[in-house]
Image (cartoon, rainbow, N blue to C red):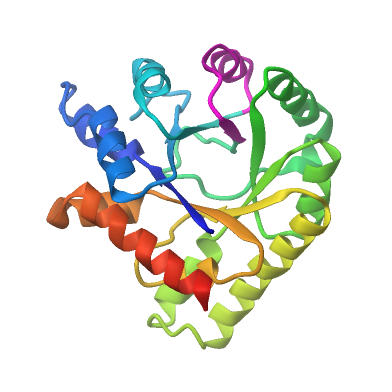
Amino acid sequence: MIELGVNIDHVASVRQARATYEPDPIWAAVEAHLGGADGITVHLREDRRHIQDADVRRLRDLTQIKLNLEMAPTEEMVGIAIALRPEMAMLVPEGRHEVTTEGGLDILAQEAALGEVIARLAGAGIVTSVFIDADLGQVEAAARIGARVCEVHTGPYAHAFHARGRDSESAAVVEELERVRAAGRAIGELGMRFNAGHALNYFNVQPVAGLPGVRELHIGHAIVSRALFVGLREAVREMKRLMREGSAR
Protein backbone atom coordinates (compact mmCIF):
# COMPACT_ATOMS: atom_id res chain seq x y z
CA MET A 1 0.00 0.00 0.00
CA ILE A 2 1.27 3.47 -0.86
CA GLU A 3 2.78 5.39 2.06
CA LEU A 4 2.88 9.07 3.03
CA GLY A 5 5.87 10.82 4.50
CA VAL A 6 4.91 14.22 5.93
CA ASN A 7 7.50 16.99 5.77
CA ILE A 8 7.16 19.23 8.83
CA ASP A 9 9.89 21.77 7.96
CA HIS A 10 7.45 24.65 7.71
CA VAL A 11 6.08 24.11 11.17
CA ALA A 12 9.60 25.03 12.23
CA SER A 13 9.58 27.94 9.74
CA VAL A 14 6.70 29.52 11.67
CA ARG A 15 8.59 29.06 14.93
CA GLN A 16 11.82 30.49 13.56
CA ALA A 17 10.01 33.56 12.20
CA ARG A 18 9.67 34.70 15.81
CA ALA A 19 12.81 32.96 17.12
CA THR A 20 10.71 31.35 19.82
CA TYR A 21 9.73 27.85 20.96
CA GLU A 22 6.36 27.33 19.27
CA PRO A 23 4.90 25.71 17.27
CA ASP A 24 6.85 22.60 18.20
CA PRO A 25 7.77 20.32 15.23
CA ILE A 26 7.69 17.30 17.54
CA TRP A 27 4.06 17.98 18.39
CA ALA A 28 3.44 18.28 14.64
CA ALA A 29 5.05 14.88 14.08
CA VAL A 30 2.73 13.30 16.64
CA GLU A 31 -0.33 14.91 15.04
CA ALA A 32 0.79 13.74 11.60
CA HIS A 33 1.23 10.22 12.96
CA LEU A 34 -2.28 10.27 14.42
CA GLY A 35 -3.59 11.43 11.05
CA GLY A 36 -2.13 8.40 9.31
CA ALA A 37 1.38 9.47 8.25
CA ASP A 38 3.77 6.58 7.71
CA GLY A 39 6.87 8.68 8.22
CA ILE A 40 8.19 12.12 9.07
CA THR A 41 10.55 14.04 6.80
CA VAL A 42 12.74 16.95 7.85
CA HIS A 43 15.47 18.81 5.97
CA LEU A 44 18.30 19.89 8.24
CA ARG A 45 19.69 22.65 6.07
CA GLU A 46 23.23 23.93 6.38
CA ASP A 47 21.91 27.42 7.24
CA ARG A 48 19.41 25.97 9.79
CA ARG A 49 16.64 28.16 8.42
CA HIS A 50 13.87 26.02 9.90
CA ILE A 51 14.61 22.60 11.42
CA GLN A 52 17.34 22.74 14.08
CA ASP A 53 19.74 20.07 15.33
CA ALA A 54 17.80 19.72 18.57
CA ASP A 55 14.60 19.07 16.59
CA VAL A 56 16.15 16.15 14.77
CA ARG A 57 17.52 14.66 17.98
CA ARG A 58 14.13 14.89 19.67
CA LEU A 59 12.34 13.47 16.63
CA ARG A 60 14.76 10.54 16.63
CA ASP A 61 14.04 9.90 20.32
CA LEU A 62 10.32 10.56 20.48
CA THR A 63 8.58 9.71 17.21
CA GLN A 64 7.19 6.21 16.70
CA ILE A 65 7.22 6.18 12.88
CA LYS A 66 10.13 6.25 10.48
CA LEU A 67 12.27 9.35 10.19
CA ASN A 68 13.58 10.52 6.81
CA LEU A 69 16.42 13.03 7.09
CA GLU A 70 16.88 15.17 4.01
CA MET A 71 20.46 16.41 3.83
CA ALA A 72 23.12 17.85 1.60
CA PRO A 73 25.95 15.35 0.95
CA THR A 74 28.44 17.21 3.15
CA GLU A 75 30.83 15.94 5.79
CA GLU A 76 28.90 17.72 8.55
CA MET A 77 25.57 16.20 7.54
CA VAL A 78 26.97 12.72 7.07
CA GLY A 79 28.36 12.87 10.60
CA ILE A 80 25.00 14.00 12.00
CA ALA A 81 23.13 11.25 10.15
CA ILE A 82 25.50 8.54 11.32
CA ALA A 83 25.18 9.74 14.91
CA LEU A 84 21.36 9.92 14.79
CA ARG A 85 20.68 6.92 12.54
CA PRO A 86 17.35 7.87 10.94
CA GLU A 87 15.57 5.10 9.09
CA MET A 88 16.35 6.87 5.82
CA ALA A 89 18.73 9.62 4.72
CA MET A 90 17.88 11.36 1.46
CA LEU A 91 20.62 13.26 -0.35
CA VAL A 92 19.41 16.49 -1.93
CA PRO A 93 21.06 19.46 -3.63
CA GLU A 94 21.11 22.59 -1.53
CA GLY A 95 21.54 26.28 -2.35
CA ARG A 96 21.72 29.02 0.25
CA HIS A 97 19.56 31.39 -1.79
CA GLU A 98 16.85 28.97 -2.92
CA VAL A 99 13.41 29.20 -1.33
CA THR A 100 12.98 25.43 -1.61
CA THR A 101 14.83 22.64 -3.39
CA GLU A 102 14.88 23.69 -7.04
CA GLY A 103 15.86 20.48 -8.78
CA GLY A 104 17.22 17.01 -8.43
CA LEU A 105 20.70 15.97 -7.41
CA ASP A 106 23.13 15.80 -10.34
CA ILE A 107 24.61 12.38 -9.63
CA LEU A 108 26.33 12.15 -13.01
CA ALA A 109 28.52 15.13 -12.13
CA GLN A 110 29.71 13.72 -8.80
CA GLU A 111 29.37 9.95 -8.86
CA ALA A 112 32.55 9.13 -6.94
CA ALA A 113 31.89 11.56 -4.09
CA LEU A 114 28.24 10.58 -3.74
CA GLY A 115 29.10 6.90 -3.87
CA GLU A 116 31.42 7.39 -0.91
CA VAL A 117 28.71 9.22 1.06
CA ILE A 118 26.17 6.49 0.37
CA ALA A 119 28.64 3.78 1.36
CA ARG A 120 29.26 5.49 4.71
CA LEU A 121 25.55 5.90 5.41
CA ALA A 122 24.77 2.33 4.38
CA GLY A 123 27.62 1.12 6.60
CA ALA A 124 25.81 2.73 9.53
CA GLY A 125 22.64 0.79 8.69
CA ILE A 126 20.81 3.75 7.16
CA VAL A 127 18.66 3.28 4.06
CA THR A 128 20.04 5.67 1.45
CA SER A 129 17.89 7.71 -0.92
CA VAL A 130 18.62 10.27 -3.62
CA PHE A 131 16.34 13.06 -4.85
CA ILE A 132 16.63 13.18 -8.64
CA ASP A 133 14.93 14.61 -11.67
CA ALA A 134 12.92 12.26 -13.88
CA ASP A 135 15.97 11.54 -16.03
CA LEU A 136 16.99 8.01 -17.01
CA GLY A 137 20.68 8.88 -16.90
CA GLN A 138 20.35 10.01 -13.29
CA VAL A 139 18.40 6.84 -12.42
CA GLU A 140 21.18 4.68 -13.83
CA ALA A 141 23.81 6.71 -11.98
CA ALA A 142 21.85 6.29 -8.73
CA ALA A 143 22.01 2.53 -9.16
CA ARG A 144 25.74 2.66 -9.82
CA ILE A 145 26.48 4.53 -6.59
CA GLY A 146 24.44 2.12 -4.50
CA ALA A 147 21.29 4.11 -3.69
CA ARG A 148 18.50 1.99 -2.26
CA VAL A 149 15.76 4.52 -3.02
CA CYS A 150 15.18 7.16 -5.70
CA GLU A 151 12.73 9.95 -4.99
CA VAL A 152 11.66 11.45 -8.30
CA HIS A 153 11.22 15.23 -8.41
CA THR A 154 7.57 15.92 -9.26
CA GLY A 155 7.93 19.72 -9.35
CA PRO A 156 7.80 20.03 -13.18
CA TYR A 157 4.62 17.94 -13.26
CA ALA A 158 3.02 19.96 -10.45
CA HIS A 159 3.89 23.29 -12.05
CA ALA A 160 2.51 22.16 -15.41
CA PHE A 161 -0.66 20.97 -13.67
CA HIS A 162 -1.16 24.40 -12.09
CA ALA A 163 -0.24 26.36 -15.23
CA ARG A 164 -2.73 24.38 -17.33
CA GLY A 165 -5.65 25.14 -15.04
CA ARG A 166 -5.48 21.81 -13.18
CA ASP A 167 -6.29 19.96 -16.38
CA SER A 168 -4.78 16.52 -15.89
CA GLU A 169 -5.40 15.67 -19.55
CA SER A 170 -3.49 18.60 -21.04
CA ALA A 171 -0.53 17.62 -23.20
CA ALA A 172 2.04 19.34 -20.98
CA VAL A 173 0.77 17.61 -17.83
CA VAL A 174 0.58 14.21 -19.51
CA GLU A 175 4.13 14.65 -20.80
CA GLU A 176 5.56 15.49 -17.38
CA LEU A 177 3.66 12.67 -15.71
CA GLU A 178 4.96 10.24 -18.33
CA ARG A 179 8.53 11.31 -17.55
CA VAL A 180 7.94 10.47 -13.89
CA ARG A 181 6.34 7.17 -14.90
CA ALA A 182 9.30 6.22 -17.11
CA ALA A 183 11.78 7.10 -14.38
CA GLY A 184 9.80 5.03 -11.89
CA ARG A 185 9.80 2.06 -14.23
CA ALA A 186 13.57 2.27 -14.63
CA ILE A 187 14.06 2.61 -10.87
CA GLY A 188 12.12 -0.59 -10.27
CA GLU A 189 13.93 -2.47 -13.03
CA LEU A 190 17.26 -1.54 -11.43
CA GLY A 191 16.16 -2.92 -8.07
CA MET A 192 15.59 0.36 -6.24
CA ARG A 193 12.51 1.72 -4.48
CA PHE A 194 10.48 4.33 -6.36
CA ASN A 195 9.37 7.29 -4.23
CA ALA A 196 8.19 10.69 -5.44
CA GLY A 197 7.65 14.19 -4.13
CA HIS A 198 7.87 17.98 -4.42
CA ALA A 199 5.01 20.44 -4.95
CA LEU A 200 2.36 17.75 -4.65
CA ASN A 201 -0.97 18.94 -3.24
CA TYR A 202 -4.60 17.94 -2.80
CA PHE A 203 -5.43 18.60 -6.47
CA ASN A 204 -2.50 17.00 -8.30
CA VAL A 205 -1.56 14.07 -6.07
CA GLN A 206 -3.82 11.33 -7.40
CA PRO A 207 -2.23 10.83 -10.84
CA VAL A 208 1.18 10.43 -9.17
CA ALA A 209 -0.22 8.10 -6.50
CA GLY A 210 -1.61 5.97 -9.32
CA LEU A 211 1.74 5.41 -11.06
CA PRO A 212 2.85 1.77 -11.17
CA GLY A 213 5.36 0.84 -8.51
CA VAL A 214 5.39 4.09 -6.54
CA ARG A 215 5.94 3.24 -2.88
CA GLU A 216 5.90 6.52 -0.99
CA LEU A 217 5.09 10.20 -1.51
CA HIS A 218 6.73 12.96 0.53
CA ILE A 219 4.52 16.01 0.95
CA GLY A 220 4.94 18.98 3.25
CA HIS A 221 3.95 22.50 2.22
CA ALA A 222 0.44 21.62 1.03
CA ILE A 223 -0.33 19.66 4.19
CA VAL A 224 0.99 22.33 6.56
CA SER A 225 -0.95 24.97 4.59
CA ARG A 226 -4.20 23.00 4.84
CA ALA A 227 -3.53 22.40 8.54
CA LEU A 228 -3.87 26.13 9.23
CA PHE A 229 -7.59 25.74 8.55
CA VAL A 230 -8.47 22.17 9.50
CA GLY A 231 -5.67 21.04 11.81
CA LEU A 232 -2.69 18.86 10.98
CA ARG A 233 -4.31 15.56 11.86
CA GLU A 234 -7.23 16.14 9.50
CA ALA A 235 -4.97 17.55 6.77
CA VAL A 236 -2.86 14.38 6.82
CA ARG A 237 -5.92 12.13 6.94
CA GLU A 238 -7.39 13.79 3.84
CA MET A 239 -4.12 13.55 1.89
CA LYS A 240 -3.76 9.89 2.77
CA ARG A 241 -7.33 9.23 1.58
CA LEU A 242 -6.66 10.92 -1.76
CA MET A 243 -3.44 8.95 -2.20
CA ARG A 244 -5.14 5.65 -1.53
CA GLU A 245 -7.94 6.46 -3.96
CA GLY A 246 -5.40 7.41 -6.62
CA SER A 247 -3.39 4.26 -6.02
CA ALA A 248 -6.49 2.06 -6.23
CA ARG A 249 -7.31 3.44 -9.68
Image position of 234 (left or right of 79) = left
Q: State the residue at coordinates (54%, 35%).
A: 94
Q: In x, y percent, where is residue 112?
A: 84, 29
Image position of 98 (left or right of 118) = left
**Is 86 in the magenta?**
yes
Q: State the residue at coordinates (51%, 54%).
A: 197
Q: Over which residues does the magenta segment extend? A: 73-90
Q: In x, y percent, where is residue 131?
A: 62, 45
Q: In x, y percent, where is residue 129?
A: 65, 39
Image vertical order of residue 64 relative to residue 123, above or below: below
What is the count of numbered marks?
0
**Is 195 in the magenta?**
no
Quadrant in the picture for residue 33: top left
Quadrant in the picture for residue 97: top left
Image vertical order of residue 111 relative to residue 226, above or below: above
Q: In x, y percent, where is residue 229?
A: 13, 56
Q: State the residue at coordinates (39%, 45%).
A: 6
Q: Which is nearer the eye, 164 or 179?
A: 179
Q: Which is nearer the eye, 92 or 237?
A: 237
Q: State the residue at coordinates (53%, 25%).
A: 86
Image position of 150 (left or right of 198) = right
Image vertical order of residue 231 relative to residue 58, above or below: below
Q: Quadrant of the N terminus?
A: bottom right
